[in-house]
Amino acid sequence: MGDGVLSQDEINALLSGGIPDAAPADDSSGGGGGELTSQEIDTIGEVANISMGSAATSLFALVNIKVEISTPVVTETNWDDLSSQYTDNCVVVRIGYTKGIDGSNVLVLKENDVKVITDLMMGGDGTNTDAEISELHLSAISEAMNQMMGASATSISSMLNKMVDISPPNATLTDMTSISPGEIDAFLEGNFVRIAFKMEIGDLVNSEMMQLYPISLAKEMCAAVLSNMEGDAQSTVDDGGGGAPEPAPAPAPAPPPEAAPQAAAAPPPAAPQMDPNMMQGQPMMAPPYMYAPGPQINVQPAQFTPFGPGFAAQFAQENIDLILDVPLEVTVELGRTNKTIQDILDFAPGTIIELNKIAGEPIDVLVNGKYVAKGEVVVIEESFGVRITEIIKE
């Protein structure tokens, strides 16, 4: 338009009240080749925003602390540009789609964030982050990502209008600067879509999480979302340009049931006759309820044979003899304590567990789990025994 002459495309756009279609943006700063249009980038950002909102709710249920995942930033990039942003090891989680869409995606989380999440999942306060990443951490974060991405897949299913399912996540501790991207997933060897989220978990985490998509998968999801939107718009037009749908015709009233033959119906009880002169100026009232008395029933108080003074003792003695040989489980309890899951996992030969009993204090004797006596530990030849020192009476 530098020579003052409008092109045909510009003329058409002005007549329609719009602007000419822009060419796909070349995101050279992100390392991509501009394979996605601006509309596709906006669409994939909206899909990621909705799906990660569901994922944040799932993560909150696991860690029991408020989780916030901000609006995503979508760019095209490649592995060289992505890996240059990480100087420390990261945990890379790969999730494949097994139904609905074809492809996979990769989540990149910082090592400290994984330690905080897994510590919260195991009952800690999120501050136990000194230990190195172990198989326990990777297993826990895989389960967290399974819950999060399962909720995300459910949201994507509703947007794409088809069932979407995922494979179990696979988490690995990765040095981003030295690993070959093909070892994580083949699509990382070329250009791909990077979706950056700001993740906050209470006051413990204020970090960034990355989600990586192959460009082919991003285009497939965008096409499905736009197709559903066009289908909904077409349905609105078919219904009359967005107006309210015409009300369905009211069903015809059902014909009155035919009168049954008089011989088959029992005659109703005759209503009491009332003097018409008495009804002048009186409100209408329903006829009184007619009660027909039934047959007389003989009701008498129950009679019981009185027990003699020695009956109860004799009865108890005869019945206790029947169960004297029933075995009962006798448990001697030295003491108790409470441990967290992390403490139990740290058990090893030589670990000392402190109990709630003081040295020399009587031990508890339980019969079928019921506290019945106190005692002290003795040694009988080569076996331990218990000498009863006190019987507990309730």
Image (spheres, grey):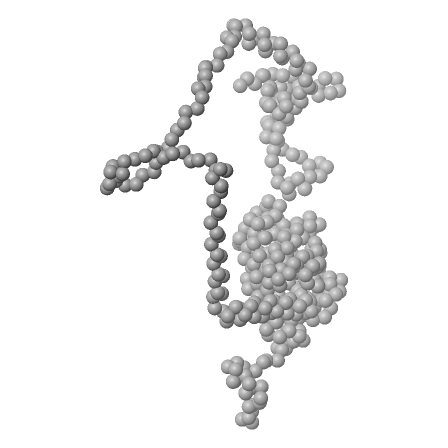
Residue depicted at 69% across the width and 50% down the height: 139
In the image, 295 versus 47, the foreground residue is 295
89 horizontally vs 284: left or right: right
In the image, 292 versus 358, the foreground residue is 292
Instruction: Estimate the x, y position of residue 219 in percent, counting from the top left.
Output: 66, 70
Residue depicted at 64% across the width and 26% down the height: 334
Up-down relation of residue 254 to residue 299 (above or below) = below
Residue depicted at 44% across the width and 19% down the height: 296
Instruction: Estimate the x, y position of residue 312 in percent, counting from the top left.
Output: 55, 9
In the image, 124 versus 218, the foreground residue is 218
Instruction: Estimate the x, y position of residue 157 in percent, counting from the top left.
Output: 62, 60
Instruction: Estimate the x, y position of residue 165 in percent, counting from the top left.
Output: 67, 57
In the image, 131 versus 258, the foreground residue is 258
Up-down relation of residue 191 to residue 357 (above or below) = below
348 horizontally vs 363: left or right: right
Image quarter hosting the N terminus: bottom right
Up-down relation of residue 188 to residue 259 (above or below) = below
Residue 74 visible at all = no
Report which quarter residue 77 is drawn in. Answer: bottom right
Residue depicted at 59% across the width and 46% down the height: 124
Q: How many marks?
A: 0
Residue 32 visible at all = yes
Report which quarter residue 204 is drawn in. Answer: bottom right
